Image: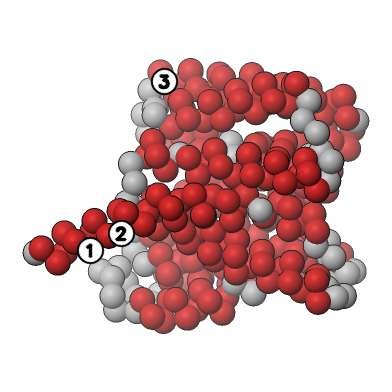
Amino acid sequence: MSEVVKSNRSFQAYAFPALLLGGISVGCAPILVRLSEVGPSATAFWRVSLALLPLGLFAALMRGQTDATATPLTLREWLTVSVPGIFLGIELVAWHEALYKTSVANATLLVNLTPVFTAFFGWVLFRRPIKRVFMSGTAMVVVGVVLLVSSGWVQGKGALSGDAIALGAAVIYAGYFMSLGYARQRFSSAVVMFASSASATLITLPLALAEGIFVPASPAGWATVVALAWIVQVGGQGLVTFAIAWLPPTISSLAMLIQPFVAAAIAWGLFEEHLSALQIVGGVAVIGGILIARRG
């Protein structure tokens, strides 16, 4: 019993550093997408396909170590673990496209609206109750989005279309999280992550081939997509997932705060994407609204 307690305390001690490191890693994703030598769809394809090897090894190592079912057997079970990947593949393509049209800050902040859309769809589809605090947070988010989109209006039609695509990506990502939650009721995280990455690979492949430039042309180009797959998709997301299991929701929300700040800071220095007053106020409103809404 004492060994279990010590083990749990050890996990808790590592959880917060893991959350910070994971948030920083995921925050680098939009920068790597911008630096990619291939298009948004091809970048999404390499991001999920190159992640299959480490995810497959992890799933094999975890086999039999959880109470969840190890392997899907029936067609229905395979669909259960594959549907999240369909949402993931489409979301990645859309968000990557948004990053080419609008600022890194706007695209990252807008896609982080996913928790709001997830709660909304949960209420519409499953009649999950929504508290007043959620409505207050949502109202604050709407104000922030209006300010962010207004900054895109100043930048031109391209930025506006990028903002719209990023919002659409947030909606699609909500579908990913809802289907992921359903799959996790039956299967382990390792199995679901591998299967969803495999189906995301199949979804993004034809879109990537249609872009024309499919294969990175230089070692630096390959390093970029490998970093997206291994450091961001596997490492960053894995660290955040581990940390959330051992930290209270209020602290776990820091991961959402870290990502846009890291992305905006690097984009400021690397791409000279200076934040306007509208973006700063809008970003604060969006982040604050999401934190409030999550309490509901």
**Does residue 284 sit above or below 69 in this rendering?**
above
Tag 1, which secondary structure? Answer: helix
| Front-most of residues 259 and 46 | 259
Asked if residue 67 lies left or right of residue 217, the reply is left
Q: Are marks 3 and 2 in contact (CB under 8 Å)?
A: no
| Front-most of residues 4 and 80 | 4
From mark 3 to mark 2, how far is it between C-alphas?
Answer: 32 Å
Asked if residue 157 lies left or right of residue 135, the reply is right
Q: Amino acid at mark 2?
A: Phe
Residue at label 3? 133
Across and down, in percent, residue 94 comes to 73, 50
**Does residue 152 sit above or below 233 in this rendering?**
above
Residue at label 1? 7
Across and down, in percent, residue 147 comes to 72, 21
From mark 3 to mark 1, how far is it between C-alphas?
Answer: 36 Å
Q: Is residue 81 visible?
A: no
Q: Are marks 3 and 1 in contact (CB under 8 Å)?
A: no
Residue at point 28%, 75% (across, down):
65
User: In the rendered image, which quarter is residue 242 located in?
Assistant: bottom left
Residue 11, labelled with which disc? 2
Quadrant containing the C terminus is top left
Tag 2, which secondary structure? Answer: helix
